[in-house]
Image (spheres, rainbow, N blue to C red):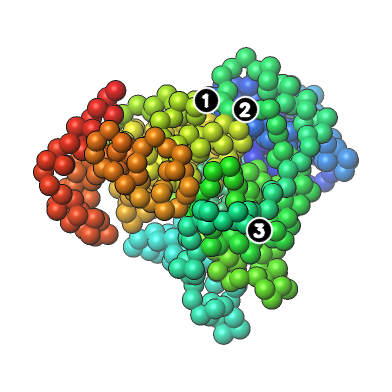
Amino acid sequence: MTIGLWILGDQLSHQHAVLTNLSPATPIILIESLAHVRVRPYHQQKLVLVWSAMRHFAQTLQAQGWPVTYAEAEEFRSPLLAWIEAQQITELRVMAPIDKPFAQQLATLELPCPITIVPNNQFLWSAEEFTQWAKSRKRLLMEDFYRASRKRFNVLMDAGGQPIGGSWNFDKENRKPPKKNDPTFQPPAPLWFEPDDLTQTVMQKVRDLDCPTYGRLDRFGWAVTRSQAQQVLAHFITTRLATFGPYEDAMVTGQDTLWHSLLSPYLNLGLLHPIEVVQAIEDAFHEQQDLPFNSVEGMIRQVMGWREYMRGVYVYSAENYGYSNWFGHQQPLPDFFWNASQAPMNCLRQCLDQTERLGYAHHIQRLMVLNNFTLIAGIAPQEIEQWFHAAYIDAYDWVMQTNVIGMGQYADGGMLASKPYAASANYINKMSDYCKGCQFNPKVRVGEKACPFNFLYWDFLDRHRKKLAQQGRMSFILANLDKMPETELEEIRQLARTWQHG
Ligand SMILES: Cc1cc2nc3c(=O)[nH]c(=O)nc-3n(C[C@H](O)[C@H](O)[C@H](O)COP(=O)(O)OP(=O)(O)OC[C@H]3O[C@@H](n4cnc5c(N)ncnc54)[C@H](O)[C@@H]3O)c2cc1C
């Protein structure tokens, strides 16, 4: 009997659940499939990241003595068949894919030997553990899950089993606007890497692809090995963690990454495990007396709260969750999403431009600029989900459905968020410097200079007044809508219709 192991492209983990239980004589295969990348026009930076990280991972395994086959193919089945025959494999082992579409593909794959699926160990909570937690709840509140997670893994807890600092959440000390006119408001430069020969070969392959792609590849600096990803984590802790919390939600022209960690691409590929990120941050907090707790707690909440929760809800939600459309939005995605320079508002242009260059935008740019815009403009959630999936370096089905369909578009009717993340220009003007370089006025709701975020926002509230009235947290803002003069509201409706249709 010969066992063979197929390592998927987002399972590049040194703690891989199958790898760690096999002898180093076990044949291993990794496959780059072109059919897989033809599904949507992926960002060129993402294709380079995934393929280069796979190739480096294969090299590491080879250096450790594993017999590795690395295939570049049109699809997965042909290289699998050839490898199974050549190696006389009688059982194929695969770690369970995180994404449901791939799991389905695997379930229908016809091979001459049986496939054994081993539970995925790339998250803190296994699929079964999250499901058990969720079944015991009336509502799936992230805050409840986060507290359960902190207790379960004993993170930032004192000896008496209480949260360090006396509270679970220090958000009120975070979410500060940027210091717009302060030249010293400068985040440290992120850690980028020069592409080595292997990465340059992949860059050329991506440039030569005969299928549509998105974004630019003039430079590539992402980490492609575990050791580089560990350096990014260490660099984040020493240079950015202290200021991460307060300016987590700020947006500044020309500062693509601010104090964010840039760890999602590596966590999502398996190069880093969430427990090592959490432990490194907690250790730094205990070792360095001067690390502000609001930043430490804020970062831990992102990784052991939000990230695990989003994946858990994905596992727990119905198969058709991705098709949800609670508001019934049907507008097509504007073309400028694929061409930043055509975006009419400066905030959209800035966020789209950096997405084109890097495949990266931070959370508030994704949520409160790009997603907010598509929500209030009434764009079909599935169209915007497809765009996000193509555009971001860290995008996978599990993280798209919950973040875009659930959190961003509220298309699940509130399974995940307690109210829609919809906002007028006021929020963007407060949290960024984007409005000062814009042709529109963030303070104006109607007329030629009115910022579309304003009339689209009030039109969104007006269009969905009945549905939104069911959400307790919307009553204050709906009361403001009720106070608006009918003539102004009519003008808002007109402007929104004109904008949407043409
Ligand atoms: C519309 C939308 C789309 C998103 N798309 C993706 C995506 O494709 N891939 C992705 O990994 N994240 C996605 N997120 C979540 C979050 O925006 C990114 O994880 C984060 O911006 C990545 O940058 P960072 O590593 O510098 O994050 P930091 O701000 O430094 O946060 C630290 C880490 O927390 C985790 N995290 C925080 N919030 C979330 C969340 N809501 N979901 C999952 N992980 C979270 C990430 O692993 C991240 O690396 C999306 C959020 C929204 C609102």
Sort mark 3 into few (<14), some (14-19) or many (20+) by Cα contacts within 10 Å: many
Is there any visible trace of residue 277 in the rendered image?
A: no
Closest to the observer, 179 or 350 = 179
- Give residue 102's position: percent from left, percent from top: 55, 34
Instruction: Measure the C-alpha gap from mark 1 to mark 2.
Output: 16 Å
**Contact, mark 1 vs mark 2 (Cβ under 8 Å):** no
SS class of the residue under badge 3? loop
Q: For mark 3, what is the residue?
A: 240
Is there any visible trace of residue 428 in the rendered image?
A: yes
The answer to whether residue 317 is left or right of residue 189 is left
Closest to the observer, 315 or 182 = 182
Residue ID at (88%, 40%): 63
Residue ID at (70%, 68%): 284
The amino acid type found where label 1 is placed reads Arg
Farthest residue to the top: give it.
Answer: 210
User: Where, by quadrant of the figure, is residue 68 drawn?
Assistant: top right
**Contact, mark 3 vs mark 1 (Cβ under 8 Å):** no
Sort mark 2 into few (<14), some (14-19) or many (20+) by Cα contacts within 10 Å: some
Q: For mark 2, what is the residue?
A: 216
Sort mark 1 into few (<14), some (14-19) or many (20+) by Cα contacts within 10 Å: some
Q: Which mark is residue 40?
A: 1
In primary-sequence order, the first of circles 3 and 1 is: 1
SS class of the residue under badge 2? loop
